[in-house]
Amino acid sequence: MDTSTDGSARPGPKERTRRLLRQAAQELLRAGKPLTVAAVAELAGVSRATAYRYFPSNESVVLHATMAMAVDPVADTVPTAAGSPAELDARAAELIRTTAAWAFDRENELRTMLWLSLNPDPEARRPRRFMTNRDRWISALLDGLPSDVPAPARDRLAAALTPLFGSDAIVWTTDMAGLSRDQAVELLEWMARALIAATLNDWSGESPPHSHGETSA
């Protein structure tokens, strides 16, 4: 048996090749380069025939390249329970800062994943892995709302918070609004606080609830 100096089993040749190819795929994703079997083979220094034995299609390259994104520690980040509106505000700000830092540190990866998700060929689309995390982050945050906030208001807030996470937040704050990273994070945090405050005010008696879909006479 192939073992290391500490007695643990070493990966065999096939597993070492698989890891090498996976690392190459992840490096291509980080660099924003095409995720193809040919590109992975060249970067890993193996023949295309060898690469195709492990990654039979470009889609499999994408799958392995994005796999690390799904197991990143921040993926399990959820805001702790809020006992008051003031705590909810603080939880929202903390969540935005944490997830925005994570997103900007992985900007190339997220932009590539966004591009892949917009591919006009349905067979070539890959799921945007951060979407599941984003939904969980928002859901956990909204658990801190007072119980008398109705479902439509909760759903509206969840929808409004959606563009404050992941590649969506990066694209519109930097490409469209022309903000620096620090400015973008500050704006995202302010927006989260403002949206939550507006929702709480609507149902606290400080201002009348908005009646959507109706116009004044």
Image: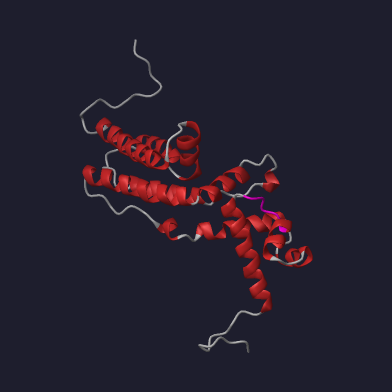
The quadrant of the picture occupied by the C terminus is top left
Residue 34 belongs to magenta span: yes
Q: Is residue 156 above or below residue 94?
A: above
Number of on-image labels: 0
Q: Residue at x 41, y 22 (%)?
A: 213
Q: Residue at x 38, y 42 (%)?
A: 182
Query: Is 94 in front, or is 108?
Result: 108
Residue 204, image x, y percentages: 22, 33
Percent across and percent down for residue 85 are 23, 42
Is 52 left or right of 9, judged from the image as shown? right
Q: Quadrant of the N terminus?
A: bottom right
Write down the region rendered in magenta.
33-37
Q: Name the residue nearer the viewer: 26 or 130.
A: 26
Position of residue 190 measured from the top left corner of the image (x, y, whole percent): 32, 37
| 196 magenta-colored | no
- Location of residue 41 with respect to 216 vertically, above or below: below
Say above or below: 18 vs 98.
Answer: below
Q: Nearer the viewer, residue 191 or 80?
A: 191
